[in-house]
Amino acid sequence: MITTHKRLLLFSLTCLAIGFGWFASADANAASQRLVLTGSSTVAPLVGEIVRKYESMHPGVRIDVQTGGSSRGINDTRNGIADIGMVSRALKPNEKDLHAYTIALDGVSVILHASNPVSVLSKQQIADIYTGKITNWKSVGGADARITVVNKAEGRSTLELFLQYFQLKNSQIKPHIIIGDNPQGIKTITGNPHAVGYVSIGAAEYEAKRGAPIRLLALDGVDASVAHVHSGAFPLSRPLNLITSHVPQGLAQHFITFARSQQTHELVEAQYFVPISAE
Amino acid sequence: MFQSVQNDALTCWVLRAGAVISALVMLLILAFLLIESWPVLDQITPARFFTDTSWHPIEGTYNLTPMLSGTLLASMGALLLAIPLGITSALFIVFYAPTHLALPYKRMIELLAGIPSVVFGFWGLTTLVPLINQLHPPGASLLAAILVLTLMILPTITLTTYSALKAVPSEFLHNAAALGLSRWGMIHGIAFPAARSGIVAGVILAAGRAIGETMAVLMVAGNVVQHPEGLFDPIRTLAANIALEMAYAMGDHRAVLFVSGLLLMLLVMVLSAMASKIGKNQYA
């Protein structure tokens, strides 16, 4: 009986000890130079790579990258929780208190299953499909099959860009499937030959090159490709920004300059984003 | 002797502290949900969550009822399939299967219980949804959600029922055998009544898991906010709603998502209250 009690005591003491150990180590880390970045899950993987390169060049610097969406990046930067925010769109008029530094460009592409015979859709046709005025692929020169409309969840910047370009409100859209992130969207399209959706061009081109059965649709006669986003010809595109609440100084300024320099172009292209022209 | 009393007292306090902390965490979560959703609860009448025309939080309409019905239909459908399957497979292990079959079978059920939900979701998205799509587009549907949830809660029900049946004192069963009861008579008349509270607890646990499951449902249910008219219509559950939109939500939109969290918690509370009632009534 006594041994059971002792074991219980020992267990609780161990828990306490582990707790203290954890606090102590957290203190030790605070000694080095630190930056916290939060925001867009589109920008975060790229920034993660840039951070890895930056940290290897500057030992002693620790940079934390956390995702949570562009809105979180803006909130955290305003509240001072993050030193730098990551935002996958241009700043809105009511966000002019923040400073934005573009590190790369991204485009949004409408995608179909590769087996779908439809190769061109006009802007009006896409809008009609998404608002439920066209419900069968026959009406736009395809097979006799019901169209499955794949939309993004409310609040996503991909959705925002899409709605803005097609001048729609989200309540006008009649979706059959609503998805969260790009990989889920691509998985949904590859699993459904009669679906239409939209995702980041970088993600779509990457998956298409790796053999996923999807086709990127041209818009206004411009092929959806990383190259056309770079040249500025592709209409459905957006900047990927780092934002700060003040003019950046010290470590933050140094990191942002590094992120915009030619040294990161390789990393940007590896993620199928489009580097900005060097200044 | 004195040492042992002192130990007892100390252990007692450690346990009390543990109990208070667990209860506090629950209250803190509730308080946190209320605080986070207050900006919206303060501004608009709660009735609007049930009478608004649709769920478009950015445009200021906040109808939560389609997601409430989606959550309930998906979990009830899954329970409807999983309860009979789970109980019969537990009966099979305990009373019918020969030992060399019962053990590997139970191991397999345990393995099923250990599969992470995101794996079920992935399997559902890449295999089940395209299959249903051939039957009736768009594939991502209430049916897909029910089937994936069934697979996830089936092992919970099987394993808790198994434990409950195993805990029935063997004298009961020996006596039943001595009275000349058939195997089914023994199960129906002795084992089930004795194991009832354990089985009910397992079903409640499974129901809680089904209601709160997020990732797997998010991947296969289609997530369109609507009252489904049939099994092939896509639905969105309350948990999936939070996971889908929280990452990009700001201001009122964010607060409304906390309201849907609050509603989810209320649902689980009602469920557990109902469960304790059912458990008591059956015993009287």
Image (cartoon, coloured by chain):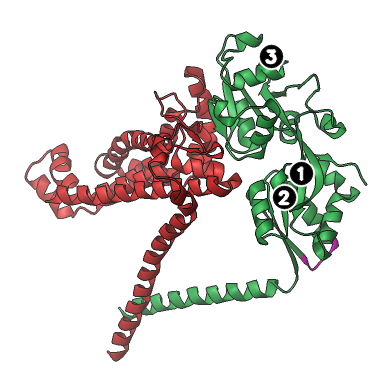
In the image: residue B58, left or right of residue B269: right
Residue B55 locus on image (x, y percent): 49, 35
Please identify, in this view, whether the residue under mark 2 or under mark 3 is nearer the observer: 2
Residue B186 locus on image (x, y percent): 14, 42
The front one of A166 and B107 is A166
Choose the circle earlier in sequence order: 2 or 1: 2
Residue A192 locus on image (x, y percent): 58, 23
Circle 2 packing at 10 Å, graded few (<14), some (14-19), many (20+), is: many
Assign a secondary structure to mark 2.
Answer: strand
Q: Colour of chain B?
A: red
State yes or no: discs 2 and 3 in contact (Cβ < 8 Å): no
Look at the picture and state if A37 lies above or below B233. Answer: below
The front one of B69 and B7 is B69
The question of residue B6 being in magenta is answered with: no
Residue A168 locus on image (x, y percent): 63, 27
The disc label shown at residue A240, or none? 1
- What letter labels the chain drawn in green? A
Assign a secondary structure to mark 1.
Answer: strand
Q: Quadrant of residue A146?
A: top right
The front one of B92 and B2 is B2
Circle 1 packing at 10 Å, graded few (<14), some (14-19), many (20+), is: many
In the image: residue A64, left or right of residue B271: right
What's the residue type where badge 1 is placed?
Leu
The disc label shown at residue A118, or none? 3
* Residue A242 appears in the picture as rendered: yes
> Which residues lie in the magenta part?
A57-61
State the residue position of label 2.
A86
Look at the picture and state if B83 lies above or below B233. Answer: below
